[in-house]
Image: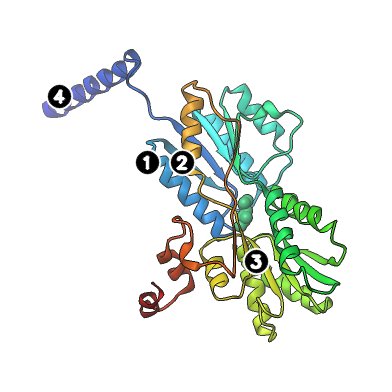
Amino acid sequence: MKKLCIGIICLLVLCLSGCSRGAEDPNIQERIVLGFSQLGSESEWRIAASNDIRRAAEEADIQLIFDNAQQQQFNQIRAIRSFILKGVDVIAFSPIVEDGWDNILEEARVAGIPVIVVDRKIETAQEDLYAAFIGADFHGEGVRAGEWMVERFARAEGPIRIAEISGTPYSSPTIGRYEGLREVLRDYPQFEIVISHSGDFMRSKGRESMEFILQGTPDIDILFSHNDDMALGAIEIMKERGIRPGIDIAVVSVDAQASGLVALRQGQINCLIECSPYAGDLLMELISNIVNGRPFVTYTYTETRVFTDRDDFYALPVQYRLEDIIVAARIEPHYTMRMR
Ligand code: GYE
């Protein structure tokens, strides 16, 4: 009993001294608490993005409360509300669709919690409902896809028939990529977008979309897929039907994740527009600036490169580690030896 009492007293003393130290000494920073609402885990890109945020938070010593909304906007709203109730220092989220965020963001504002929009954009009449945005230029990605088509098919006789597998309806990457492509092709009437079907950014639905496209739309020259996963699903269907992806139908896709790069290497994808999921470090830096009252950049766009089947595979940027690509392609180890 005596030992227990001493133990409790020691614990109390420790607690009190810890609390007062933190409160009195301005040099001792409490850990920043970040509530992050991820929209789901639909694609290789998304998994890379979630992992990158976890890694970056740990390295920046930021406490992360991570929620996966499983592709449902109401789950995201519920998660953001729970972050507000917990009194986190900052909230970040990747919105599944563009609209419908005003009310919950107003709740965050009332609670005095800054919000950062990551990856996808939102549509709001009140831009000041969020502090900053980090993500890619989706419209620019669509433009680059169109530019590649124009260049590669420069000498082809029209009509050049394009099938599009788009991403999640009403999401900003879908809208941006859709519009960017059309903006370029407007000046080249020999290109015709003959069908556009949503595959929701998922491989399984990419398969379904391609099946649907092939059933009713003959003579496709180019497939434009809004992400790699759907392109890979579509490629499976093409092969099952005896169509050679990358030869009979040119394939252009966005993301340039490991399995996409493998398909590019294998000649099944002809052009990949990069969309980087690695925004974790930028996000943590932004958070630290915002929470500590330092100046910060309100709109940050990640870089976009274009990789084509005519590029040197070994000249890939450092973040695409050869090991990851090999794992994604399930290439036998002896093949690894021959690659370099
Ligand atoms: O292209 C796709 C993912 O929002 C940029 O979402 C992201 C997109 C990405 O599911 O693969």
Cα distance between the residues tagged 3 and 2: 28 Å
Q: Residues within 10 Å of mark 2 (few under 14, many from 20)?
A: some
Cα distance between the residues tagged 1 and 3: 33 Å
Picture quarter with ligand 1: bottom right
Q: In this rendering, would 133 be left or right of 340?
A: right
Cα distance between the residues tagged 2 and 4: 45 Å
> Contact (CB < 8 A) between labels 1 and 3?
no
Instruction: Check disc 1 and report its element: helix, strand or loop.
Output: helix
Q: In this rendering, would 166 be left or right of 71?
A: right
Q: In this rendering, would 93 be left or right of 182?
A: left
Q: Badge 4 is on which residue?
A: 6
Residue 251 visible in image? yes
Q: Looking at the picture, does residue 147 appear above or below residue 251?
A: above
Q: Badge 1 is on which residue?
A: 59
Residue type at numbered disc 4: Ile
232 vs 267, nearest the viewer? 267
Q: Badge 3 is on which residue?
A: 230
Q: Residues within 10 Å of mark 1 (few under 14, many from 20)?
A: few
Q: Badge 2 is on which residue?
A: 281
